[in-house]
């Protein structure tokens, strides 16, 4: 049986308090929807869970030179928002593709701990979970330092942590909610990228940073009003390009994945069911994306197969942005 180790980092961190804004809604329109699992910022230390009894992962053999470049052999990946949804699925794809280790930073301890237990059991690699709220700069930096100590190095960062508010008319947008979303989606992406890039720079090696943006950074969604989410994701996309330009000479590549409507818990809100029909109707492929539909691109961006690619934002949306 696997055992799980939990311990607290001792470094003190600042604690900021945010009101929980999760709202249950039954109407389709003009009803604010917040599908975030995040309530209060309640932790003042990073709790870490390490799955034990690591076995040697099976070697990936018999690949052509081209396919070999797609493997993540020897690479350690940090994933924010990897406890569930798209981040969780891409984390498993990294493991399947030969990653040497994975580290998840998320606010959901039960799901995060279960994820690293399952991944270690299935793939035989070290997988660690750190309870971190990406709004807490000190906690993010402390966790990234801890990941580097636990795994030896960091080669890949996938920023998937994010929340969505929707069906909020701009003229009624509450500023606490607005700032909270920007703090998680945009500032949280920046502080994590900064911490990981500083680690790569100090160790004198490059790496690959991957941001999960959204098609909402490219188009305005219909029919729901969600100006803050759309602006946050446009910000993530432009942040990605700025960092790609700044850090290219450090060997750090930065790219983004912009999904369309995906079938994840973020969208499994009863009040969105009727709107989903409209989303599907307006998507040329006539469906929502499956949770694993980003995995191939994530592995490509993390791997050496994409070594000449930086500053790109790739849309995976079933064709939504073509119309
Ligand atoms: N589902 C979609 O249709 C869709 C479309 C475009 C983009 N995206 C983006 O993809 C990413 C993943 O979305 P998902 O659909 O898997 O959602 P999800 O809610 O299932 O997963 C998001 C994860 O982020 C974590 N998280 C949220 N706030 C956090 C915080 N403050 N600190 C640390 N972790 C936090 C959550 O605990 C969760 O594990 C998000 O950035 C989202 O904006 C989703």
Image (cartoon, rainbow, N blue to C red):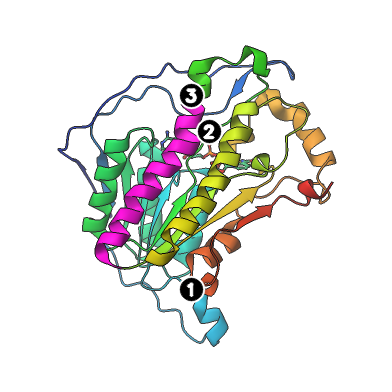
Q: Is residue 201 left or right of residue 279?
A: left
Give the mark, 1 or 2, whose residue is nearer the N terminus.
2
What residue is at 30 percent from the left and 61 percent from the top? 201
Instruction: Name the residue carrying label 2.
Output: 163
Q: Is residue 91 visible?
A: no
Q: Is mark 1 within 8 Å of ligand 1?
A: no
Q: Nearer the viewer, mark 3 or mark 2?
A: 3
Q: Nearer the viewer, mark 3 or mark 1?
A: 3
Q: Quadrant of residue 33?
A: top right
Query: Tag on residue 179?
Result: 3
Magenta segment boundaries in residue numbering:
179-204
What residue is at 50 percent from the left and 31 percent from the top? 182
Q: Are marks 3 and 2 in contact (CB under 8 Å)?
A: no
Q: Residue furthest left?
A: 10
Q: Disc 3 to disc 1, how far (Cα)?
A: 37 Å
State the SS at label 2. Answer: loop
Q: Is residue 320 visible?
A: yes
Q: Are marks 3 and 1 in contact (CB under 8 Å)?
A: no
């Amino acid at each position: 049986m696997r055992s799980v180790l939990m311990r607290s980092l001792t470094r003190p961190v600042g604690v900021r308090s945010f009101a929980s804004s999760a709202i249950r809604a039954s109407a389709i329109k003009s009803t604010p929807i917040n599908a975030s699992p995040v309530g209060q910022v309640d932790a003042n230390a990073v709790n870490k869970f390490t799955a034990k009894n690591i076995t040697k992962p099976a070697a990936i053999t018999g690949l052509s030179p081209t396919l070999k470049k797609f493997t993540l052999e020897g690479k350690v990946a940090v994933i924010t928002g990897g406890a569930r949804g798209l981040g969780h699925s891409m984390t498993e794809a990294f493991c399947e593709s030969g990653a040497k280790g994975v580290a998840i930073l998320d606010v959901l301890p039960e799901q995060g701990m279960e994820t690293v237990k399952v991944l270690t059991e299935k793939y035989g690699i070290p997988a660690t979970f750190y309870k971190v709220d990406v709004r807490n700069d000190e906690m993010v930096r402390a966790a990234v330092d801890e990941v580097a100590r636990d795994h030896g190095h960091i080669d890949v960062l996938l920023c998937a942590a994010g929340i969505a508010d929707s069906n909020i008319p701009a003229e009624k947008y509450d500023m606490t909610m607005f700032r909270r979303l920007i703090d998680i989606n945009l500032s949280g992406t920046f502080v994590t990228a900064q911490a990981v890039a500083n680690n790569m720079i100090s160790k004198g090696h490059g790496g690959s940073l991957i941001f999960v943006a959204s098609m909402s950074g490219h188009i305005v969604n219909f029919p729901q009003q969600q100006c803050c989410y759309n602006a946050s994701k446009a910000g993530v996309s432009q942040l990605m390009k700025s960092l790609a330009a700044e850090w290219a000479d450090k060997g750090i590549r930065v790219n983004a994945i912009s999904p369309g409507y995906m079938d994840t818990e973020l969208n499994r809100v009863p009040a969105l069911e009727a709107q989903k029909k409209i989303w599907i109707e307006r998507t040329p492929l006539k469906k929502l994306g499956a949770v694993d539909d980003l995995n191939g691109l994530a592995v490509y961006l993390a791997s050496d197969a994409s070594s000449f690619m930086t500053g790109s934002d790739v849309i995976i949306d079933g064709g939504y942005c073509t119309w």
